[in-house]
Amino acid sequence: MENRTPVNIVSTNRILWGVGTSRTLRALWTLLELDLPFEHQRITSRSGETLTPEYTQLNPSQKIPTLQEGDFILAESAAIVNYLLTTHGAAKNLAPPSEPRLRARYDQWCFFCMMELDANTLYVIRKHDDLHKLYGEAPHALQAARDGFARQANAAAQRLADGRPYVLGENFSGADILFTTCLTGAIRRDIALPETLHEYLKRITARAAYQSAAQRNQVVAPK
Ligand SMILES: N[C@@H](CCC(=O)N[C@@H](CS)C(=O)NCC(=O)O)C(=O)O
């Protein structure tokens, strides 16, 4: 990926809100890939901590993660990943591409992950499986979402079938962060993945920043 002049961020007063979900993992992992200093406010989902007036002021959606950088506040995990990589990724060759077609390919992967894998299938599974008491039993929707994820995972595997190490080719990027966190979510839900994707995951999850982020993203229940 090409080098670009980093945007000059004056404030280093950086806070990441949220822990314990695949969405918070994306933001944490990105911060660690970039070696950026930050304070971690380890609020969890469905604990009431996203519902306080203070947090609602930061994020009216009452969801995690949220990134605070001085007076700049950003929600949506994929937006946080891309913001951090755009502002601080150049030195590590991690800034999203600016050449229009490369950027379009990058966006294709990001939107694919967030829509086809995260919103359209994984979140439907979560709602009607673990959270069925809140969202209702919906066995048909649940099965369709599981099948849908598997179909889209096969499509992604075809795109990686040329043996490329990362989704964009030779360089690790934010799209790999989004893709990996969707695939690990699917494995937790016992969705079978093609071998190409297991090999891909082995490579990506061996990264030091991933390992450290996965550890820091764990929520330990009080004894
Ligand atoms: N599209 C959002 C989804 C964020 C989201 O749904 N977060 C959940 C946890 S995974 C949440 O905070 N739910 C509110 C709550 O549980 O209190 C993103 O990618 O950041």
Image: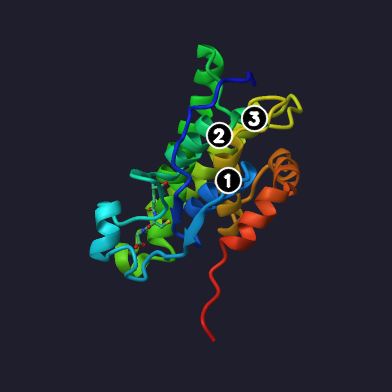
Give coordinates of residue 42: x percent, y percent. 47, 64
Which residue has dot 3 on it? 91
Which residue type does callout 1 highlight?
Leu
Taking the spot 55% from the left edge, 58% from the top edge, the residue there is: 189
Q: Are marks 1 and 2 in contact (CB under 8 Å)?
A: yes
Give coordinates of residue 41: x percent, y percent. 45, 62
Which residue type does callout 2 highlight?
His
Which residue has dot 1 on it? 36
Relative placement, left or right, of 88 versus 132 is right
SS for callout 2: helix
Relative placement, left or right, of 103 versus 67 is right
Return the disc, 3 or 1, that comes first in the chain's sequence: 1
Return the disc, 1 or 2, that comes first in the chain's sequence: 1
- Quarter of the picture containing the N terminus is top right
Taking the spot 45% from the left edge, 32% from the top edge, the residue there is: 111
- Quarter of the picture containing the C terminus is bottom right
Which residue has dot 2 on it? 88
